[in-house]
Image: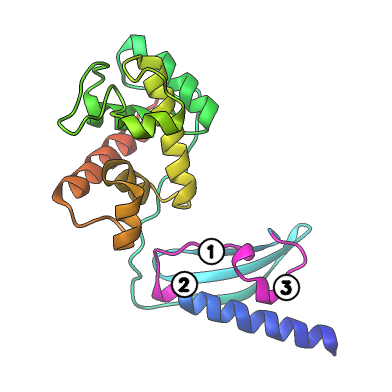
Amino acid sequence: MGSRMKMRKTLAVLTLLAIALSASAERRFSAANIPTAKLKKPGKVVITNDHQGITVQRFFGKSKEVLVSIRSSRTIRFRPSPSVFDSNASVVAPAEFASHIQDASRKHGVDPRLVAAVARRESAFRPRVVSPVGAVGIMQLMPATAKYLGVEDSYDARQNIFGGARYLRTLLDRFDGDLDLTLAAYNAGPGAVQKYRGIPPYAETRAYVAAVRATYEKSLRTRG
């Protein structure tokens, strides 16, 4: 009887979570987000959502059990971000920088095609370019950001690329892998993204996110 009551309580919590998910498609959840369910084995319960619903499944061995499945006739606004990491992927970049991009991406766990897409938009791969606000080099690192990332010479292409890749990794972790928010934060700063709870309403930032994402997604469709 006690175990049955616990299961009912767990299902109730999961159902509320699923309803919350349907109301806010931008949020991301995992079993760790529902401590009140007191799941003994995090990772055995998987919560997934697409543009029309939410499904909660429990996996045990080679079997699975659907705990909650909510489908909606109303399309939920949802745009999944590519979740790709191929350290051996070829990149469209000048030959002298391509190996730096791949090395930096491998070290920091960021797809090299994403790093290349950011570099193209930021500087067109010009290692000595300085923006009007003082951002330097291929990945356009601000002096304070470069210092935080451990970059001693922002004009050094390899150091700059490694710093930019590390910063992208930091932002991806901070925004739970959301590509659009990561790119918005790279352009406008993470504080602006948090302030507006999404992509800031700046024309430059919105254009930046769209352009980098388009370049990145195009590169994912191109086999190197």
Tags 1 and 2 touching, CB below 8 Å: yes
Residue 224 visible at all: no
Task: Answer with the quarter of the image where residue 45 lies.
Answer: bottom right
Residues in magenta? 21-42
Q: Residue at x 23, y 45 (%)?
A: 210
Q: Amino acid at mark 3?
A: Lys
Q: Residue at x 52, y 75 (%)?
A: 18
Q: Quick check: is 32 in the magenta stretch?
A: yes
> Spatial distance from mark 1 to mark 2, Cα to Cα?
8 Å
Task: Answer with the quarter of the image where residue 140 lies.
Answer: top left
Residue 148 visible at all: yes
Q: Quick check: is 40 in the magenta stretch?
A: yes
Residue 144 at what x, y percent from top left?
35, 34
Q: Reading the chain from its start, which is encountered first: label 1 or label 2?
A: 2
Q: Which mark is residue 29?
A: 1
Could you tell me which secondary element the residue under label 2 belongs to? Answer: helix
Decide if residue 29 is on the left or right side of residue 82. Answer: right
> Measured along the vertical axis of the image, is residue 163 above or below residue 209?
above
Residue that mark 3 sits on: 38
Residue 75 at what x, y percent from top left?
33, 71
Q: Reading the chain from its start, which is encountered first: label 1 or label 3?
A: 1
Closest to the observer, 178 or 8: 178
Tags 2 and 3 touching, CB below 8 Å: no
Q: Which mark is residue 137?
A: none
Residue 33 at what x, y percent from top left?
59, 66
Could you tell me which secondary element the residue under label 1 belongs to? Answer: loop
Q: Residues within 10 Å of mark 3 (few under 14, many from 20)?
A: few
Residue that mark 2 sits on: 21
> Measured along the vertical axis of the image, is residue 12 above or below residue 202?
below
Decide if residue 119 is on the left or right side of residue 146. Answer: left
